Image (spheres, rainbow, N blue to C red):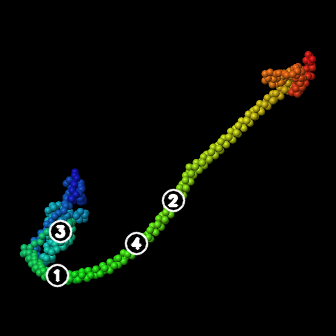
């Protein structure tokens, strides 16, 4: 049977051994692993920062002065696999206190060795350089154990023979002496400097007064010259002002004339543009619509012409067809009449004068109707003069046979002479 072994992010776990007598070893940082009961060994090592306080008491310096030095170091196990394996070889199975004690002894040994090579003044005056030297010397050894020195500082330096105190008193006395000398020299220099400043001040004052008087005289003389020149220049300026004013007026007038010319040109341009606009407007509102209307009327006329031509063609075709139909009808009627006349002629030829008499008799009523048609429209006939009614009637009757002969080609008198009782 087995179980899962876990470690935190600041711990490393080593699982060694396994089934069938295996001797493999697995390194896990901040994770979990499977461990077999009774056959697998699980050990862990802390990766957290460890704070150490190395103390070296009564260590003689290069000058033989015994001093005591205390420091503070921050160390930790490196996470790189190669260094972590070295740390596991050195400290696996040990507690944190045991690891700290080993590293602390290493640091204290190097600290003692370095103290023996330096003077008290060098250690005391440049603690940072001393701490840097300790870190550089101790780092290779602790790296062999997989440990990294993150920081090392000197906390305190003191001795039991008052060597450092004597250095402080002598330094203090020297400083005080130098300070008193400096104050006296400063006071002396200040007095000398003050006298020099007073002399310089008076010399400067007298020189300044003289310069002020000279400057005042020069000012008044120059002012009189300036006033005279100013008055002359003022008169010249007034004349020049009037002359310049006249010139400016001329320029202004010229500019006004130029402005008027420009305005007139602008007005002309505006009027020309207005003319062009009106022309375009007339073209757009009159010419184009008229052209469109003319084109429309042309299209309408063309359509009407086409329609009229087509209608005329249709009407001509209609008339032609009607004419053809009427011609055919007339032809048929003519043929029928011809046939009728042929038959009548054949009958007349067969029956001779009797048939002709029958035709004349059939025609006489029509002739009488045509002769009397004008008389039918007369309400009353009045004969004035001699009574010639009988003679007129007789004349009319006598003219009838020639008329019938002219119309029909039948000699009515000859036919009537053959009719019994028809002649008187």
- Measure the C-alpha gap from mark 3 to mark 1: 60 Å
Between circles 4 and 2, the one closer to the viewer is 4
- Measure the C-alpha gap from mark 4 to mark 1: 57 Å
Q: Nearer the viewer, residue 401 or 259?
A: 259
Q: Say which element carries label 1.
A: helix
Residue designated by label 2: 267
Q: Are marks 2 and 3 in contact (CB under 8 Å)?
A: no
Residue designated by label 1: 198
Question: x, y percentage for residue 50?
Answer: 17, 63
Asked if 365 appears above or below 134 in the picture, the reply is: above
Neighbours of disc 3 within 10 Å: few (<14), some (14-19), many (20+): many
Q: Quadrant of residue 403?
A: top right
Q: Nearer the viewer, residue 170 or 173?
A: 173
Asked if 78 appears above or below 387 in the picture, the reply is: below
Residue 351, visible in the rendered structure: no
Question: x, y percentage for residue 243?
Answer: 43, 72
Which residue of the protein is positioned furthest toward the top in this rendering? 421
Q: Earlier in the sequence, mark 4 or mark 3?
A: 3
Question: x, y percentage for residue 142?
Answer: 19, 68
Q: Are marks 3 and 1 in contact (CB under 8 Å)?
A: no
Q: Are marks 4 and 2 in contact (CB under 8 Å)?
A: no
Q: Is residue 60 left or right of residue 293?
A: left
Q: Say which element carries label 3.
A: strand
Q: Earlier in the sequence, mark 4 or mark 1?
A: 1
Q: Say which element carries label 4.
A: helix
Q: Is residue 175 left or right of residue 352?
A: left
Which numbered dot is residue 241? 4
- Measure the C-alpha gap from mark 4 to mark 2: 37 Å
């Amino acid at each position: 049977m087995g179980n899962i072994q876990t470690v935190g992010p600041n711990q490393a776990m080593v699982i060694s051994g396994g089934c069938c007598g295996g001797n493999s070893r697995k390194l896990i940082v901040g994770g979990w692993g499977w461990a077999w009961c009774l056959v697998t060994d699980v050990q862990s090592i802390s990766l957290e920062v460890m704070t150490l306080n190395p103390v070296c008491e009564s260590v003689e310096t290069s000058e033989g002065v015994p001093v005591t030095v205390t420091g503070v170091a921050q160390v930790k196990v490196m996470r790189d696999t190669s260094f972590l394996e070295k740390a596991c070889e050195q400290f696996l199975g040990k507690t944190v206190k045991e690891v700290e004690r080993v590293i602390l002894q290493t640091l204290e040994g190097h600290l003692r060795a370095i103290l023996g090579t330096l003077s008290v003044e060098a250690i005391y005056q440049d603690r940072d350089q001393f701490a840097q030297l300790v870190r550089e010397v101790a780092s290779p050894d602790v790296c062999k154990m997989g440990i990294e020195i993150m920081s090392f500082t000197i906390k305190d330096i003191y001795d039991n023979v008052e060597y450092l105190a004597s250095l402080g008193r002598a330094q203090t006395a020297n400083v005080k002496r130098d300070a008193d000398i400096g104050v006296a020299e400063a006071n002396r220099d200040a007095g000398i400097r003050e006298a020099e400043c007073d002399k310089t001040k008076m010399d400067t004052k007298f020189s300044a007064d003289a310069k002020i008087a000279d400057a005042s005289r020069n000012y008044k003389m120059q002012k009189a010259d300036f006033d005279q020149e100013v008055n002359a220049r003022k008169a010249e300026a007034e004349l020049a002002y009037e002359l310049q004013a006249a010139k400016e007026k001329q320029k202004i007038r010229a500019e006004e004339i130029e402005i008027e010319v420009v305005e007139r040109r602008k007005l002309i341009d505006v009027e020309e543009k207005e003319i062009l606009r009106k022309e375009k407007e007339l073209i757009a509102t009159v010419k184009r619509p008229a052209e469109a209307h003319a084109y429309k009327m042309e299209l309408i006329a063309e359509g009407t012409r086409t329609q009229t031509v087509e209608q005329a063609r249709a009407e001509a075709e209609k008339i032609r067809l009607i004419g053809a139909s009427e011609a055919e009808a007339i032809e048929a009627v003519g043929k029928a009449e011809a046939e009728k006349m042929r038959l009548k002629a054949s009958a007349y030829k067969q029956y001779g004068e009797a048939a002709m008499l029958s035709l004349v008799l059939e025609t006489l009523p029509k002739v009488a109707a045509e002769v009397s048609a004008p008389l039918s429209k007369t309400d009353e006939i009045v004969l004035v003069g001699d009574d010639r009614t009988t003679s007129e009637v007789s004349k009319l009757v006598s003219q009838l046979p020639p008329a019938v002969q002219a119309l029909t080609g039948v000699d009515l008198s000859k036919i009537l002479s053959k009719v019994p009782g028809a002649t008187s």
